[in-house]
Image: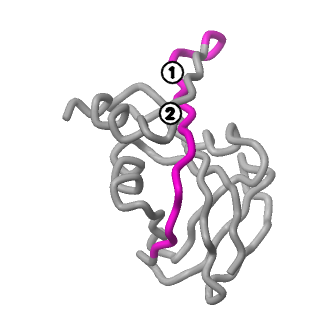
Amino acid sequence: MPTLDLYHGANAEKMLYNVMNGALTADSQGKIFFAERDWASCLKHGTDMSTKESYVVKVTVDVPDSVRIERTPVHGNADALILHLEPGGKVSARFHEMYVRSGRVGSFLTTVIPGSAIQAHLMNAKGR
């Protein structure tokens, strides 16, 4: 079972769900997308319109032997790593830190949130 340090981006609601469950969930096609080297590669989907922030986490995942790993560049993510599992399947994740980008083009601000404060930041951003 390989252990990988990766970056993963999502909107606030999905990121909060991931953090609260200590896992990342595959999409309807059974894929979870990551960046291997550059957290900014995970910003390709843009800003969460409800919070006006973008979220990327640095995680360690233990990849079960049954999960296929694909390293294929995708549009907006040149260092993409894709895990293939069952749709809705999960892989355990340890959340080390979260990069929060806010602002507008030309004046972005990036804040690094330590792992122990990720859940609180996301809950505050969502107004919970």
Q: Determine which of the numbered discs, if any, sits on residue 102 in the image.
A: 1
Q: Secondary structure at mark 2?
A: strand
Numbered circle sitting on residue 60 = none
Location of residue 24 in the rendering, given as x and y in whole percent from the top left corner: 48, 63
Estimate the x, y position of residue 55 in percent, counting from the top left. Answer: 51, 38
Looking at the image, the residue that sits furthest to the front is 116
Classify the position of the C terminus by image quarter. top left
Q: Residues within 10 Å of mark 2 (few under 14, many from 20)?
A: many
* Residue at screen point 71% across, 46% down: 76
Q: How is the image coloured?
A: one colour
Q: Residue at x 63, y 72 (%)?
A: 83
On screen, 33 above or below 99? Answer: below
The local secondary structure at tag 1 comes to strand
Taking the image as shown, residue 121 lies to the left or right of residue 71, namely left
| CB contact under 8 Å: marks 1 and 2 | yes
- Location of residue 13 in the rendering, given as x and y in whole percent from the top left corner: 33, 46
Picture quadrant where residue 2 is located: bottom right
Q: Amino acid at mark 2?
A: Ser
21 magenta-colored: no
- In the image, which residues are magenta? 90-107
Question: Would residue 55 appear left or right of 125 to someone viewing this image?
Answer: right
Q: Amino acid at mark 1?
A: Ser
Q: Label 2, on which residue?
A: 54
